[in-house]
Image (spheres, rainbow, N blue to C red):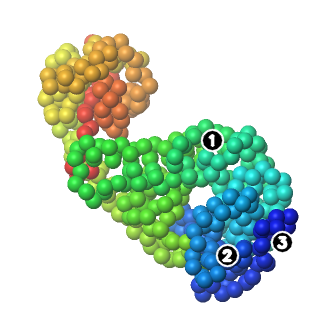
Amino acid sequence: MVIANPEKATVTTRSFELGVMSGLERYSVEHGELTLSSVFQPVFSLSHMRAVGYEGLLRAHDALDRPVSPLDVFGQASRLGEALQIDRLAQALHLENFKMLGAQTEWLFLNVHPGALTEPYHAAALMANLKRLHIEPRRIVLEVLEQSADDVERLALAVQQFREQGFLIALDDFGAGHTNIERIWQLDPDIVKLDRVMLSHAGQNVHAPLSPRTRKQRQNMEAVLSGIVSLLHEAGKLVLIEGVETEHEAQLALASGADFVQGFFFARPHPGPADSVHAQTIIGELTERYRLQTEARERRVATRLQPYLRAFERAAERLAAGEPLEEVCWNFLALDNAARCFLLDQNGKQAGRNVVLRADRAAHEARFLPLIDAQGANWLRRPYFRAALGDPERVHVTKPYLSINEAMPCVTLSVETRSGGKRCVLCGDIDWLPDDAE
């Protein structure tokens, strides 16, 4: 078994020993004055409602059986020039204990030093351990730190070679520190692990009274989290959110569309396998609460939109009957958060200026003066235009999005109608400010 570099005199690691620790049989190893062992933190699929993998984590105790932080273990090894040796030792230890875990199909997530991938000797040691333990490479997810490695091109080549042998690749700690989106394209990971800092920003001060500005900021962070997950999905990557510690953070992870979750809320690191009944129960309850909250939110939104829809439908009828745009929109624009009406031809080009009723918008709109005159603008790319033409005679409602007119959250109503005998699309914008109940 390859567990250390025999040429390194300072690495005094003895053989693996099988013992009973925490009531479970598992391997441990002595390294200097330390005893090293493994624990596993489950990775759960929210859709499957069960553990689909385990991340191997190092645990260390000194001669007096006092716990020593893994950061201190790896930090000391790095100072002694033994980072690769201790990394390889941890890998071998986790593989031994993963085999003891009895997992049949689940993945083992292994944190790896970039050198363990790029240096042939270390890569060969990993392959030798897998072969000896009869663990197929497809069962292993190699976690590469988002900011690690000086020679990214060399690392990318090594990652590709490991992938060709069947390994999966995960990009770890994405979103922490100076995130480099380019690393996604360079390493082409199968899974991206979002650092918990993204959750903490979206979920901060959840129990504190919120001002409208703070509520808007929190909603923006939640939208950013969902947007990042969506972006990664578009790039063909599965997404794992790590560090989920509270129910609110778990709800955020579920709402974001993430594929996998990991954290104390679901299960703490443990030498043994995950409690499947507990996992199914907690994820099932979480999903049910999400369903109820989503349905309640949808009912609130429908109630909130109802007066705007009635006024907008009436405006479309009057426009089709031959009345001018400037006359038909008044009832819609008189509603509290109605922003503007505008008309598009069948090619998405705006005919005429925006129709705005409320004078109190002038001060805010002045900051965006270059954008106020939208006559002749083309909104062909907007979902509200395509939806109206694709499904005529029905009012369509967009999801909230950022309006280019004032850089404010906005919902747009749209419907295909006729004006002057020509096919057109009538549109109405609503300022979508945070609602106290949302």
Quadrant housing the N terminus: bottom right
- The residue where tag 3 is placed is 1
Query: Which residue does the image show at 43% across and 70% down from the upper left?
Result: 282
> Dot 1, how many residues are within 10 Å of its Cα: few (below 14), some (14-19), or many (20+)?
some
The quadrant where residue 14 appears:
bottom right
- The residue where tag 1 is placed is 183
Residue 110 visible in the current orientation: no
Residue 257 visible in the current orientation: yes
Left or right, 224 with reference to 435: right
Q: Say which element carries label 1.
A: helix
Left or right, 318 with reference to 84: left
Q: Say which element carries label 3.
A: loop
Q: CA distance from mark 1 to mark 3?
A: 34 Å
Query: Which residue does the image show at 26% across and 38% down from the upper left?
Result: 432
For marks 1 and 2, the one nearer the N-term is 2
- The residue where tag 2 is placed is 34
For marks 2 and 3, the one nearer the N-term is 3
